[in-house]
Amino acid sequence: MPPTHLRVFFGHDYFGGNAGLLRAYRRKIERGCWAAGRSLGLTIEALYGNTKLTAELLAEIRGAGGDMAGIRHGSFWPRIEGLIRVSEFAIFDLTLPGGSDAEVNWNVLMELGVARGARLPLRALVRNRQAVLKRLTNMADAQIEECSDMQQLGALVKELIVAFQGGR
């Protein structure tokens, strides 16, 4: 029986704690997930570093070898690592709001490293692929997507999820 549910981890900037910008950004992601799910006949669940941990997610993180003691005591990295490990796919927005085209968000890059270590299929979003590849020479060109217009984020999220599902 084919899967009916897909978890996608999204690593991104938190906009300096600006709740309005964060909500608007995540709405674009959610619209892209909804459109991809509708197209594929799947329910797509977006997971973020601050996703509320339900009993079901905790059980899956435990099953994936997650550091439950660290999660229970509020440690941030075991929580993020656990969410990444229970995802089937991940998208990391490496852009820095207000940064240059070649700059990357180092915190999100660390999350991407966790996903690579877990061998999770992923894509990274940047403003200028060539500028970033000069700095991140070990990233395969196919793993980096250019997203110079954040207004198109939802459409790109849909495109990446549909392509991932098609390649499974």
Image (cartoon, rainbow, N blue to C red):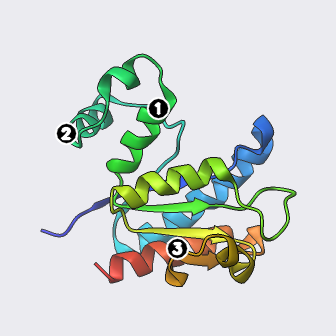
Question: Residue 23 falls in which quadrant of the image?
Answer: top right
Could you give the CA–CA distance between mark 3 and mark 2, rounded to whole angstroms?
30 Å
Question: Residue 43 falls in which quadrant of the image?
Answer: bottom left
Q: Image check: 98 left or right of 146?
A: right
**SS for dot 1:** loop
Residue on which the image places disc 3: 138
From the image, state whether disc 3 or disc 2 is nearer to you.
3
Could you give the CA–CA distance between mark 1 and mark 2, rounded to whole angstroms?
18 Å
- Tell me if residue 18 comes above or below residue 139 in the rendering: above
x and y percentages locating residue 73 in the rendered image = 42, 16
Question: Residue pushed farthest left?
Answer: 1
**SS for dot 3:** loop
Give the mark, 1 or 2, whose residue is nearer the N terminus. 1
- Tell me if residue 44 comes above or below residue 69 in the rendering: below
Marks counted in the figure total: 3
Instruction: Classify mark 1: residues with Cα within 10 Å, few (<14), some (14-19) or many (20+).
Output: few
Q: Image check: 44 left or right of 60?
A: right
At x 50%, y 63%, the residue is 34
At x 43%, y 77%, the residue is 162
Give the mark, 3 or 2, whose residue is nearer the N terminus. 2
Residue on which the image places disc 2: 63
Residue on which the image places disc 1: 52
Instruction: Let me know if residue 44 appears in the view.
Output: no
Q: Image check: 110 left or right of 119?
A: right
Instruction: Let me know if residue 21 appears in the view.
Output: yes
- Identified by mark 2, the residue type is Gly
Residue 118 circle label: none
